């Protein structure tokens, strides 16, 4: 019994320490300590972007070594793997957004943030051109490339530059895509999908429309059988079976989901067993997969596809989600143009093994915009961000000891070159099933099903940016379990 009492005291003591630590962390998060001010003796490091790469740099960078300026058209970090869940309300939008200013406020030295798009660079004068945004829907205005008032063009000087601007949706210049399809890359995209989806369903409930028109409105088409398209189709199926079937009992029977993929199979990067598992789960869930079918044009109410036998047909749709991958940002081309001898690849910025942009003396690039030999994955960008920040921290300390030394050269002496270590791939495929392709003990383990789904949930909870995000996402999952998804249009 005394032993048991002692154990009880240890457990209780541990719990008190744990709770106090958590409370202290939450308090500090809400009320951060004073920061060091701008230091004119330090170099200015400009970080472009607030995606996986750049935000991870900021998180790990020793800001006592630099004056840091962050430039991005989006003042938050977005946990993109859970974006498909936001399109149907499994997760609330703000649960996967982390304001960049909160992160900045916790750095040792003050960090400056400009909500703007970088549109040009002059490596000679070390100056960037920024386009300030006045439009509320920032991303929309970037896509439309609106003309900008002269007072919204701003110049910014840098000593060192890190480019982590990601990519943009690739429509392959297929006519009608930009006008009629919904993308799934940014938060405004998820919001637009949700509105269009509910709009289509409400419209289909009018009694005066033809049966043909009703079927069109209730046909949800996804183009692209990569992980984004698959995860969206899976989430949509769940919304249909868990919620729409209750609140629109007559209409929900008629909702159809079709996934269109140009290649012979979906999820090309995954193991064959997982592809088969996904295809059979989709077939059980009555999601049609049209492989070897390429979308050639998009019209307001139908897509024109080229079928496997070469024939063409029109497929009417109510909501069209376009998930065919990404291409480079215009800024990347503008940077490449400044280093014509070294930057010959149109797919992105060529970097060396230390992520230094080839041809430059003071620019690094990471993530989807950098051609580092790795796939354009969030995991890669995040590992690069961590590696780059730590390497720059070390190099800056070395530069302190040898004033005048060149940081670009010092990075070579401060760390081994960047190597990506794959943690595997995970994807949600609907009806509480996920697939996983994991490297374990030098072997690739593949798994699919309910257990994998719980693994998927816990992995994402763990990877979310902050304790706040993890708490919000976990509570969204509980809310959905208790009350179902919200079907209001907004
Ligand atoms: P993706 O590039 O992986 O897939 C796009 C698909 O669209 C391709 O299979 C392509 O054949 C198809 N396609 C292109 N044009 C078409 C057309 N006109 N008609 C029909 N089909 C067409 O794109 P995704 O899914 O956006 O992923 C981008 C990157 O992010 C990939 O590297 C992916 O692996 C990664 N990713 C990984 C996730 C995960 O592991 N859970 C989640 C989301 C993205």
Image (spheres, grey):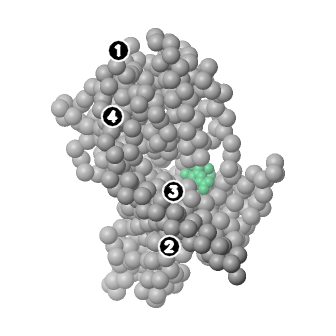
Q: Which residue is mark 4?
A: 36
Which tag, 1 or 3, sits closer to the chain's start?
A: 1
Which tag, 1 or 2, sits closer to the chain's start?
A: 1
Under circle 3, the secondary element is loop
Ligand 1 within 8 Å of the CB at mark 1: no
Q: Residues within 10 Å of mark 2 (few under 14, many from 20)?
A: some
Q: Is residue 104 left or right of residue 366?
A: left
Q: Is residue 489 left or right of residue 308?
A: left
Q: Position of residue 488 (x, y in %)?
A: 34, 76
Which tag, 4 or 3, sits closer to the chain's start?
A: 4
Disc number placed over residue 382 in the picture, else none: none
Disc number placed over residue 125 in the picture, else none: 1
Q: In front of the other: label 1 or label 3?
A: 3
Which residue is more in the foreground, 221 or 69? 69
Which tag, 2 or 3, sits closer to the chain's start?
A: 3
Q: How many marks?
A: 4
Q: In front of the other: label 4 or label 3?
A: 4
Q: Which residue is mark 3?
A: 464
Which residue is rendered at x = 70% and y = 75% of the image? 3
Which tag, 1 or 4, sits closer to the chain's start?
A: 4
């Amino acid at each position: 019994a005394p032993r048991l009492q002692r154990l009880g005291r240890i457990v209780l003591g541990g719990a008190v320490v744990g709770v106090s630590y958590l409370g202290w962390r939450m308090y500090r998060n809400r009320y951060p300590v004073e920061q060091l001010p701008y230091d004119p003796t330090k170099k200015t490091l400009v970080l472009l972007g607030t995606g996986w790469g750049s935000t991870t740099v900021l998180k790990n960078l020793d800001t006592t070594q630099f004056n840091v300026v962050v430039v991005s058209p989006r003042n938050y970090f977005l946990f993109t793997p859970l974006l498909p869940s936001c399109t149907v309300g499994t997760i609330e939008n703000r649960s996967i957004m982390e304001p960049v200013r909160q992160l900045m406020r916790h750095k040792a030295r003050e960090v400056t943030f400009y909500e703007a798009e970088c549109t040009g660079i002059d490596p000679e004068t070390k100056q960037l051109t920024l386009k300030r945004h006045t439009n509320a829907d920032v991303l929309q205005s970037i896509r439309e490339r609106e003309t900008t008032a002269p007072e919204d063009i701003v110049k910014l000087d840098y000593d060192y530059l890190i480019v982590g601007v990601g990519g943009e949706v690739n429509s392959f210049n297929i006519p009608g895509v930009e006008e009629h399809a919904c993308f799934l890359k940014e938060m405004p995209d998820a919001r637009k999908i949700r509105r269009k989806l509910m709009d289509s369903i409400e419209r289909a409930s009018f009694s005066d429309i033809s049966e043909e028109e009703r079927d069109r409105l209730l046909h949800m088409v996804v183009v692209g059988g990569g992980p984004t398209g698959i995860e969206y189709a899976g989430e949509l199926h769940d919304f249909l079976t868990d919620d729409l079937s209750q609140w629109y009992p007559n209409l929900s029977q008629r909702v159809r989901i079709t996934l269109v993929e140009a290649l012979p199979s979906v999820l090309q990067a995954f193991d064959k067993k997982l592809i088969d598992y996904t295809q059979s789960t989709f077939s059980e869930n009555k999601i049609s997969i049209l492989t070897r079918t390429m979308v050639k044009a998009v019209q307001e109410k139908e897509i024109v596809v080229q079928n496997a036998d070469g024939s063409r047909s029109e497929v009417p749709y109510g909501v069209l989600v376009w998930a065919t991958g990404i291409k480079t940002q215009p800024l990347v081309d503008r940077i490449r143009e400044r280093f014509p001898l070294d930057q010959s690849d149109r797919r992105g910025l060529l970097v060396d093994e230390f992520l230094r942009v080839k041809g430059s003396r003071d620019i690094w690039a990471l993530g989807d915009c950098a051609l580092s030999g790795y796939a354009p994955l969030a995991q890669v960008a995040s590992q690069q961000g961590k590696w780059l920040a730590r390497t720059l921290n070390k190099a800056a300390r070395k530069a302190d000891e040898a004033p005048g030394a060149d940081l670009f050269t010092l990075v070579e002496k401060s760390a081994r070159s960047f190597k990506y270590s794959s943690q595997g791939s995970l994807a949600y495929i609907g009806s509480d099933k996920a697939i996983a392709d994991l490297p374990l003990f030098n072997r690739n383990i593949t798994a699919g099903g309910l257990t994998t789904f719980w693994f998927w949930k816990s992995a994402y909870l763990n990877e979310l940016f902050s304790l706040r995000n993890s708490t919000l996402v976990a509570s969204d999952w509980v809310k959905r379990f208790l009350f179902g998804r919200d079907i209001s249009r907004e």
